Image (cartoon, rainbow, N blue to C red):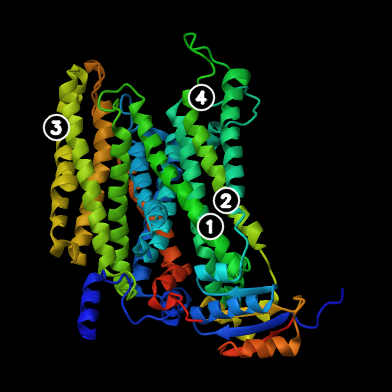
Amino acid sequence: MMKPPIYGVMAEFDNPTSLVNAAREARERGYRKLDAYSPFPIEALTEALHLPKSKLPLIVLIGGILGGLTGYLMQYYVTVIYFPINIAGRPLHSWPMYIVITFELTILFAAISAVFGLLAVCGLPMPYHPAFNVKRFERASRNSFFLCIEAADPLFDRKGTEDFLESLDAREVCEVAH
Amino acid sequence: MADERQIAEDELQPAPVIAPGYTFGTVTDQIASVVLTRRTPVFWIACFAGGFSLLLLFLWAVALLFAKGVGIWGIMIPVGWGFAITNFVWWIGIGHAGTLISAILLLLNQTWRNSINRFAEAMTLFAVACAGMFPLLHMGRPWLFYWMFPYPNTMGVQPQFRSPLVWDVFAVSTYATVSLLFWYVGLMPDLATLRDRAPNRWARATYGIMAMGWRGSAKHWQNHEMASLLLAGLATPLVLSVHTVVSFDFTVAIVPGWHSTFFPPYFVAGAIYSGFAMVLVLAIPLRRVYGLQGLITDKHLENSAKVMLATGLIVGYAYILETFTAWYSGNVYENAAIWHRMTGPYAGAYWFLIACNIVAPQALWFKKMRSTPVLLFIASLVVLVGMWLERFVIIVSSLAQDYLVSSWRVFHPTRWDWATYVGTIGLFTFLFFLFIRLLPMISIFEVRTLLPQAKVEEEAK
């Protein structure tokens, strides 16, 4: 496949409402490869862009289960098999005493998988992204809102998409170099 | 008519958490400017220098400890725990308020927390770092600390997993790790803001590497929100478990004055009590020096004061119940332990802590008290002193006079006990002011969501 000449077209908006409206409209037009950038989380945007449900809860659940198993089995192995200590004939498999460490390791593994899962799902760390080629994009972390339609979208048309974004109450529309 | 409705609405609306008039731009600029300016306030230099001097004192005390051993402290048999464990419990309790603010108040949807959670989490991290010092230094041979972890070794021995002291190792190290991760996740978007606004190359590169390429895309935010929620859900039971496990160090032992089932909730309440006091001690001067009264408003101080009052009352209830249980149990040793506390060699510390923790905070019932920052600052210092004394009295008075009268001995701290304790206050101050200068002390992106402009209007289309 031939690489398109530019990464996409980006429109800047002044407030979250215009961004959500624009995202919704672009979606209705049939654009699928688009992303919105904002300085804070906007719930309505997730819905407007029809983002799939986050995979994080599943990742964290698996991490937590692994942590719990690790904690319990580690203690079982040490106290029953590797280093059994007979204290007045009390049972070696003293599970009530295992609860605390099992719990702590469940939390630890779940939290670590939440953070690394977050990075993995977001594709971070990412040293380079074309969006930063737009001079004004540095305002995306301050007070501006951006919508970018990528050139990889089947409906993308350099002129047509630009005109479409212009019609959406945008402050400025510009091309994003690779 | 319209005016009347407006007035009625204004009265129904609670006071705003953020002063009116802010925009996304001004919020960002004001918080980021503390970090990105070349000017450093005299207040910062003074506090940093003070903290650094005490940190040097700490290093001196620790170097001497490494050279000579724990004999330079006042600990002996029967009081083997002395200052070290007192300070450990005190510091780790202070850390708990940070997690309460960042996790529990997030789950409870208390948006006012958004402008104090960042520095409260930093406080947690540094307090846990200070707390961690004490069990390590108290070990006698701190360089062998890794013996506490289960790892395959040539000695053929393993930790005793049925001991609360080993539980503590897991609880505290998990707590430190999770607090650090939670703090970092919250920082990512703000690091991106600093990257985009840093005036020079070096700062841009540093913040850029730390932000990991965050660009605020809808997908990033969606997962970031989810991760914050999950981490808050994990941190909430964790924070309650940590002080519970710390209290197990005492309750599982059969020492009179320690062996009690109500220690876990009592310790957790005390932890939050002292932690909120520390939050106020830090917030009140900071907001004044950096002119942040619009972001950390009087409402924040008042809410924190109310939490302090509530937890203070729980602690007061615990003191009463402790005394009642000792009497009601009919156990002579329990009775004697409480009686020694009230009238024995530590009676002065006991009554002073009652005055600090129960009597003095009753002033917080008055609105005037809660809305005057100077008075609130003093009240918080009083609570911090009181909570330290509480830990001291619980640990030392119970150990000094237990079952066998012939082994009773009174603990006297040495100057190196004090130097190590005051030294960790220096370590805390040093780390905290480094944080103030290098990272945004208020969560910028979370404050943006508090502004009225952040609301997406229901469009007519």
Do marks 3 and 1 share a chain? yes
Q: Which amino acid is tagged 2?
A: Pro
**Label pair 2/1, CB-CB below 8 angstroms:** yes
C-alpha gap between disc 3 and disc 2: 52 Å
- Chain letter of the residue beneath label 1 in the structure image: B
Q: Which residue is mark 2?
A: A57
Element at label 3: helix
**Depth check, front residue: B256 or A164:** A164
**Depth check, front residue: A29 or A74:** A29
- Residue A45 picture location, percent across and down: 55, 71
Residue at the spot x=29%, y=43% of the render?
A: B269
On the picture, is B18 further left or further right than B195?
left
C-alpha gap between disc 4 and disc 3: 36 Å
Do marks 2 and 1 share a chain? no
Q: Which residue is mark 1?
A: B226
Relative to B316, say whether B41 is above or below.
below
Q: Which residue is mark 4?
A: B160
Can you see residue B245?
yes
- Chain letter of the residue beneath label 2 in the structure image: A
On the picture, is B63 further left or further right than A68?
left
Residue at the spot x=33%, y=71% of the render?
A: B43
Do marks 2 and 4 share a chain? no
